[in-house]
Image (cartoon, rainbow, N blue to C red):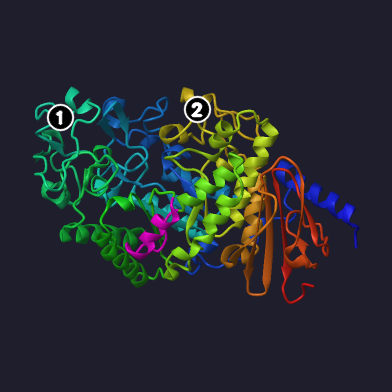
Amino acid sequence: MLDSKQWTRTLATAASTLFFALGACTEKNPTDATEASYKTRPIEADVIYFVLPDRFANGDPDNDTGGIEGSALDHGFDPTNKGFYHGGDLQGLKDKLGYLKKLGVSAIWLAPPFKNKAVQYHPGGVSAGYHGYWITDFLDIDPHFGTKEDLKQLIEAAHGLNMKVILDIVANHTADVIKYEECHDVENPNGPIAQDANPCAYRPLGEEPYTAFTPKSEIGIKNPEWLNDTRFYNNRGNTHWEGESAVYGDFAGLDDLDALNPQVATGMIDIFKYWISEVRPDGFRIDTVKHMNDSFWQIFVPAIEAHAKAEGIPEFAIFGEVYNLDPKALARFTHEAAMPAVLDFAFQDAARDFISKGAPAQALQTLYAQDSLYSEATSEARRLPTFLGNHDMGRIGHFLSIDQPSDDDQTRFKKHILSHALLLFARGTPVIYYGDEQGFTGDGHDQDARDDMFATKVASYLDNDLIGSSQTTAVDNYNDGSAVFTALQKLIHIRNSNDALKFGEMEIIGTDNPQLFAFTRIYKNHQVFIAINAGDTDIMTATPGGKTGWIDLIGDTGIQGEAQLLVPAHGFTAVKTDLTQAK
């Protein structure tokens, strides 16, 4: 048995080793551990990797322009412009599955791969559909990304590695094709009038909708054919994001479907049943859920779940995007809208406040105290996908830079790893945004958070620093030996190796220090204790109940027994015990 000073020094060394990722993981291959099959594995057992295929890897340069003739304003390909296609595709993602497997992630969330309107005019300018959310053909793959066969092969290859593929889908809207006679020039629908700040202000339900028309050049471009009928849309102009406009208005000009029309519900169900049968994905992430009527989801979700089961996919995951920071507002969708789970924006906000902004741990404690709000049918809150940043709001690396600009590189690196420790060890299904495992920062939200993993040609991406690395964005960034990659790899391995961190009930442990957040996860006879220190000084803390018999999870030191633990500055401790053996 070591004395308390030796114990403190050893834990500090183990934590330092993790944070600076100077050594290899203690296992020869941490991803070789026995895993449940992707076919039967519940979503809360997964670590998800969210990727925009256009920005990840270019496996087939021949499809860069999507087979469309003309200039970038026609085909949308311009690797120097952050708002256009850059060349990434499904083949490239398939080629890099080994990289993701080595990281330890077990599911890939793929931004919509369906055929998009290549270039779209919008208030303030023009950009391309590289992100996948401007769909015209719901029954085919965007030719910039590849083909249906490419998607099939990607999913089959992922399944061969025991990994899932979750498709991002859109049911709320299509690409912006429909125009309105009252605010668009019929002869020149993409002309100056369409570029006004708000050319088609929202018309309330008590008023007549706009007079809809389809420009001659775009008649019949949507598939299935029923999507070309303007009667299936609300046609009320642009949402102003509040009140009824948030449900019935056009999302930034995108054609808003009439969710109350039973033919729309039937049509959308048929579309996504087709994809389940055709390529056999493992789940759907659903875009803009709060912008459709609850009654639509009450029909759509059960139909999709039943079809997946009939196709032999019993653990088909469904989670919706509800952009709201209030757990009560989020939880409503697991009850009234039949969503099995929703993205946990409340977690993202509280995690950033605590680790990046230096707020007290109370916000996190309040967050988890509201977990009972979520539907019990979804295993309470354990299935909620949690995340630190994304393609819309920005990256955690960017938040760390702007929230505490005086932090040095070492401190920022520690906080980056610490934030992922919270993500991976607390309740929920963790989602890692592509590039975060290489320390990407980005410059802000939206297009500024959609950096290229391959050597970029975008000027505003080229000047970005990577956390924990001297490498630049001017080269490919798939370094499986980088400091951030190896640190996150180890955190993921700890989670994957401990069922308590996947399925365990989470209990908050109260502390007197506002910069310390501590909790336990208990599953069957195993208990894991995690303490997160967001402060800049070391903290000593007691194990729950002062019990001994704890085993260190950080460095596999073999030390056990002490009831006092050191939590290093901007660091954490992770220990476990067998409840039948603890004293």
Quarter of the image where one finds residue 466: top right
Q: Residues within 10 Å of mark 2 (few under 14, many from 20)?
A: many
Q: Nearer the viewer, residue 173 or 407?
A: 407
Q: Look at the picture and state if 228 lies above or below 505.
A: above
Local SS, label 2: helix
Numbered disc 1: secondary structure: loop
Q: Which residues are magenta?
A: 326-343
Instruction: Determine the residue positioned at 24% across, 37% down.
Output: 253
Q: Which amino acid does the dot numbered 1 rest on?
A: Pro
Q: Image quadrant of residue 281?
A: bottom left
76 displayed left or right of 572: left
Picture coordinates of residue 193, whole percent (x, y)? 17, 25
Few, some or many residues within 10 Å of mark 1 (<14, 14–19, 20+): many
Mark nearer the N terminus (2 vs 1): 1
User: Do we see residue 300 in this rendering?
Assistant: yes
Q: Quadrant of the N terminus?
A: bottom right
Q: Could you say which is closer to the camera, residue 160 or residue 363?
A: 363
Q: Identify the residue under disc 1.
A: 189
Q: Quadrant of the C terminus?
A: bottom right
